[in-house]
């Protein structure tokens, strides 16, 4: 049995930084699939992916609240925060990588693997040794070398238990500035509310919500708030039917979903800047997109650094990247056999200087609700 990998506040900071990296790492794959769908088609799938991406922003914010509560400093612009795709996510079997893919059965299969429930058979098996050939696990232990977690749910359980352990020995653990907390008035997702973190109970509540909404680890098909867990939302796309209350996990009985796998821009999987013709207009567009994404991450960092009012602008900005997506995914990539271009999410060093405040940074909840594709 591996002993606790969290002994002190510094260990918690390392884990919470890893949690923020993990929650963000799902957003580029989800957005790539979402924007690859031809406009006006596959409305069921587009809605499921879009709502899930917004809720990943909710998870990112909750992790930032916990980090701020213990005096940490969230930084989404730090080197390595955005992974180099394809990247591994540990699930105990090493059977998949996370790629930037167009909407497809393969993409949905990856999404299900990311979100799938994975409670370890016993406490002894929460941590799994990392094979030497794997170098980029997003949820490896930041304090136990060459060890990763059986699942994302078990990763969060480690943090939850670590918080309790450290708080028992450090009464001043939750000393962070309350002004750095993002409250529910600053974020609307439709699938859960922000938890303001001030103590052990609220920190554990926030982290259990993240794990439950993603995997449905302890709550079954629905999370504690009665929302369908992310894993089962994506399973609907595989099974072609919506879940309704009372359904078994593999037998949804609600209305059917209409999916057309051909109504999609066939984006090159995990395209890189090196795949673009040097000096081409398409390469410039790809670089510009990466710079814009860097600015988006800088805006979120500022929101988590005492400007929570900027978070609504950040959520809207995530979907204002639409134009950059469309300029790429609608165009064939020369030399790729007819496949299309796509964002690479290779964020340049120093990207995203202080973004300031755009004219509509004070958007209301209603504005956040009505951002469209």
Image: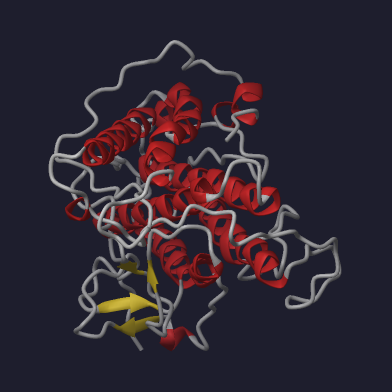
Tell me the quadrant of the picture where the C terminus can be found. top right
Which image quadrant for residue 124? bottom left
Q: Which residue is found at the position 22% from the left and 79% from the top?
A: 146
In the rendered image, is residue 181 in sight? no
Tell me the quadrant of the picture where the N terminus can be found. bottom left
Nearer the observer, 254 or 42: 42
Report x, y in % for residue 139: 35, 67
Report x, y in % for residue 17: 31, 52
Report x, y in % for residue 44: 70, 52
Up-down: is 166 above or below 282?
Answer: below
Nearer the observer, 314 or 260: 260
Q: Which residue is found at the position 33% from the left and 47% from the top?
A: 343
Colour style of the rendered protein structure: secondary structure
Which image quadrant for residue 77? top left
Q: Which residue is found at the position 19% from the left and 84% from the top?
A: 132
Nearer the observer, 323 or 189: 323
Q: Which residue is found at the position 54% from the left and 61% from the top?
A: 211
Which image quadrant for residue 229? bottom right
- In the picture provided, is 14 more to the left or to the right than 214? left
Of all residues, the one furthest to the top in this rendering is: 359
In the rendered image, is residue 271 in sight? yes
Report x, y in % for residue 297: 33, 36
- In the picture provided, is 303 more to the left or to the right than 230? left
């Amino acid at each position: 049995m591996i002993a606790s990998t969290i002994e002190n506040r510094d260990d918690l900071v390392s884990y919470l930084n890893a949690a923020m990296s993990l929650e963000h790492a799902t957003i580029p794959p989800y957005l790539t699939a979402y924007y690859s769908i031809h406009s006006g088609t596959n409305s069921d799938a587009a809605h499921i992916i879009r709502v899930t991406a917004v809720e990943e922003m909710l998870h990112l914010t909750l992790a930032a609240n916990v980090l701020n509560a213990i005096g940490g400093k969230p930084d989404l612009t730090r080197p390595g925060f955005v992974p180099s795709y394809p990247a591994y996510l540990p699930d105990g079997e090493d059977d998949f990588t996370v790629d930037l893919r167009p909407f497809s059965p393969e993409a949905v299969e990856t999404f299900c693997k990311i979100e799938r429930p994975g409670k370890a058979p016993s406490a002894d098996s929460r941590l799994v040794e990392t094979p030497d050939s794997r170098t980029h696990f997003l949820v490896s232990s930041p304090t136990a070398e060459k060890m990763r977690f059986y699942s994302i749910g078990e990763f969060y359980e480690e943090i939850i238990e670590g918080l309790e352990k450290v708080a028992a020995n450090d009464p001043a653990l939750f000393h962070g500035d309350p002004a750095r907390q993002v409250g529910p008035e600053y974020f609307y997702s439709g699938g859960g509310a922000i938890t303001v973190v001030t103590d052990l109970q609220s920190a554990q509540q926030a982290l259990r919500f993240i794990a439950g909404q993603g995997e449905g680890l302890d709550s079954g098909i629905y999370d504690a708030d009665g929302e369908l867990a992310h894993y089962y939302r994506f399973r609907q796309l595989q099974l072609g039917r919506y879940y309704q209350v009372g359904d078994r996990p593999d037998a949804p009985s609600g209305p059917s979903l209409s999916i057309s796998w051909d109504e999609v821009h066939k984006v090159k999987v995990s395209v890189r800047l090196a795949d673009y013709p040097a000096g081409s207009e398409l390469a410039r567009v790809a670089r510009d997109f990466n710079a814009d994404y860097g600015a988006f991450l800088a805006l979120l960092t500022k929101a988590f650094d005492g400007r929570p009012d900027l978070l609504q602008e950040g959520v809207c900005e995530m979907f204002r990247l639409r134009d950059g997506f469309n300029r790429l995914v609608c165009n064939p990539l020369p030399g790729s056999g007819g496949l299309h271009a796509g964002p690479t999410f290779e964020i340049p060093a120093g990207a995203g200087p202080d973004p300031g405040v755009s004219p509509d940074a004070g958007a209301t909840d209603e504005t956040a609700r009505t951002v469209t594709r």
